[in-house]
Image: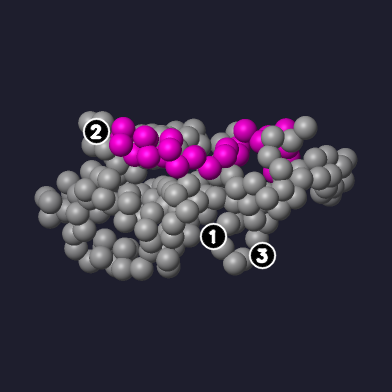
Amino acid sequence: MSRFQAGALVVYGNLGVHEVEAVGLRRFCDEPAREYYTLRPYFSDSHDRSYIPTEKEAALRPVTPAQQAEADLARIKAEKLPIPAGVQTALAEHYQALLHTNDFYQYLTLFKELGQKQTQQQNRGRKINAMDAYFYQMVERVLREELAVSFGESQQESGRRLLEVFALKLHGDFYQQMYADLSTAPYYAIKIAPG
């Protein structure tokens, strides 16, 4: 029996919130038919669909309930995290390891680490590293989508909630442009799905 039913909202790794459109037998190429989830990006009008075998449903998780999200937001706000530093390849592995967990709290951890690092860079008058900005925007988008569903609010409100919780300051053109209109934030889709 499938863990998720049609109509359920799930988080599909760094690809964000998806709606389970259907659960049923599908056949691709010369493979025998097997049961798949058909997923549709929840915050997109695109006709893109993802097909995940039900035996690999560990790549999916339910959207975090509002009460748990609120507790995790409060917990991460109080937690002292080190600012990531080191060689780019090691940092990329660290960021990807947190993404591979497909865990709400680990995503919050990555968001806070990168936000602190970017604020530190700006305070020193340095440019924001492109890789850090990429991962920051990716995890911010997933968290914004999930919080919007959890709290029944718009993505703009969820984006503000994230910024308020971490008391991140908007410095320079990069952040002002990025947050000018959260509804048009770019969609980053490298597939780092767990499983």
Does label 2 or label 1 sit earlier along the sequence? 1
What residue sits right under mark 2 in the picture? Answer: 78
Alpha carbon separation for disc pair 2 and 3: 41 Å
- In this view of the protein, which residue sits in the foreground, 51 or 163? 163
Q: Is-magenta flag for residue 187?
A: no
The answer to whether residue 95 is left or right of residue 114 is right
Residue type at mark 2? Ala
- The residues colored magenta run 52-76
Residue at image coords 43%, 67%: 184
Report x, y in % for residue 74. 30, 36
| Number of marks present in the image shown | 3
Q: Name the disc covering residue 43, or none.
A: 1
Residue appearing at x 57%, y 38% in the figure: 61
Element carrying mark 2: helix
Marks 3/1 in contact by CB < 8 Å: the verdict is no
Q: Are marks 2 and 1 in contact (CB under 8 Å)?
A: no
Say which amino acid is labelled 1.
Answer: Phe
* Spot occupied by residue 78 in the image (x, y as percentages of width and height): 24, 33
Q: Please say whether residue 167 is visible from this viewpoint.
A: yes
**Residue receiving disc 3:** 47
| Quadrant of image for the N terminus | top right
Q: Could you say which is closer to the camera, residue 86 or residue 76?
A: 76
